Amino acid sequence: MKTKLFQFMQNTIAYALPVFLQQFIVYPIMAKKLGSEENGLFLSLLALNYFVTNITATVLVNTRLLQNEKYQEKKEIGDYNVLLVIFAILNSIFIGIGTYLYSAKHVTKIQIILSIVLVLLFLYHDYITVQYRIELRFDKILINNLILCIGYLVGLMVFFYRGLYWQTVFLIPYFMTFLYDMKNTNYIFDPICITSIFRDTTKQYFILMGSTLLTTAVTYGDRLILYPLMDGNSVSIFTAAQLIGKMMQMLSTPINTFVLAYLVRKNEMHLKIKVKYIFMGGFALVLLYIGSIAISYPMIHFLYPLWADESLKYVYMTALNGIVLMLGVIANVFVLRFCKRKYQLIISLIYLITYIFFSFLLEKYIGLWGFCMGNLLSAITQLVFLLILIYKYRIVKIIRN
């Protein structure tokens, strides 16, 4: 138990460090350097990079975690590097075209090349850490992300004082972790070949990819949609308002991956939760919400003083949305492991449809405030459906004593 708790702390800290650095140091400094409009473009292009990385590398990680036992039983090695090569080609094309279009065609060849190199480093970094998870080497994940943090600071200084392209801030840290991962992992050296399990693995990947594509479209879609729909200034205001809510959502990722790494070793799960603990959890969430609002005011004023007053108009909605999404991510890891895989696609489809319907409908009538409200309504709908599935499959049972 102590070992698992220690590993959980390592995993959580490993994710929290770069998230903290990005949200409180990297993004605010870049915002001051770029200005509201250019900052909005930068955030949109970065969201485009994260979007393609999530639907390729992140899904491949979960696929390998879920399929690992089959490969060990049949003593097969392969498949994953074939998929990785395909993703590298597709991601490069997608990012090259996306950077050109989002920059309103006012972009240099070097900027497109840097964006392609960046997405390839993202792809490698996010995929190769699957080896650390399978081997439960959370200490190496922590070291990896410490190196990432150091690289961010170096990249930020180069960008701020030399005025180079924004991609520099991310290229330097991800290249540093690339060197570390090359020394500490060997999955990248697996043969580029197809095994007897390839068809099943590909099927599992596309099932997970289908659901992740939808949720990722929602996660990063706000910036990708708001920029062409409104302008860079609106993206900057909305992103600052999301600061606390987005952090809660992002920090739920280590909980997700940590729990999944252990749940794949279990064939069934029946948790018993006392009613009093549900009330205690609800009370804790209320405190979390109040605390989030209280922290947001001085924090946003300090980090984004140029548009803080505008951003704070929406923070009540975005903080609540972050909490609901965080609960959804945690609930979904149990649904992913113990319910039929088809539900991943259904969950994401429900989320995307309600997101588009509520967000765009309300944005049309009440602007950015309506967009925030639509985000919240879609998140609540998703969480309710997840809880229904958990109850249906008896993963959790509520008891009085």
Image (cartoon, rainbow, N blue to C red):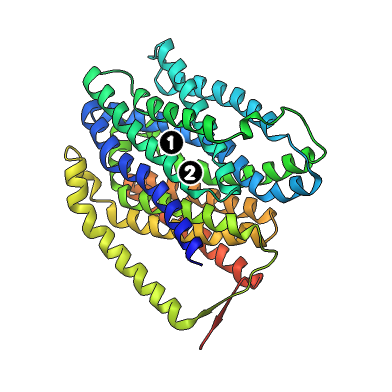
As helix, strand or loop, the secondary structure at mark 2 comes to helix
Q: Whole-Å distance between the Cαs marked 1 and 2?
A: 36 Å
Q: Nearer the viewer, mark 1 or mark 2?
A: 2
For residue 231, say whether it is visible: no
Please name the residue shown 47% across and 35% down the image: 50
> What amino acid is found at the position of numbered circle 2 in the picture?
Lys
Please name the residue shown 63% across and 30% down the image: 84
Nearer to us in this view, 72 or 49? 72
Is 280 situated above or below 22?
below
| Spot occupied by residue 300 in the image (x, y as percentages of width and height) | 21, 46
How many other residues sit within 10 Å of disc 1, few (<14), some (14-19) or many (≥20)? Answer: some
Quarter of the view holding residue 144: top left
Q: Circle 2 is placed at which residue position?
A: 140
Check the image and name the residue furthest to the bottom.
401
Nearer to us in this view, 346 or 362? 346
Is 29 situated above or below 328?
above
| Spot occupied by residue 210 in the image (x, y as percentages of width and height) | 63, 43
Check the image and name the residue furthest to the top.
109
Please name the residue shown 38% across and 54% down the image: 248
**Label at residue 225:** 1
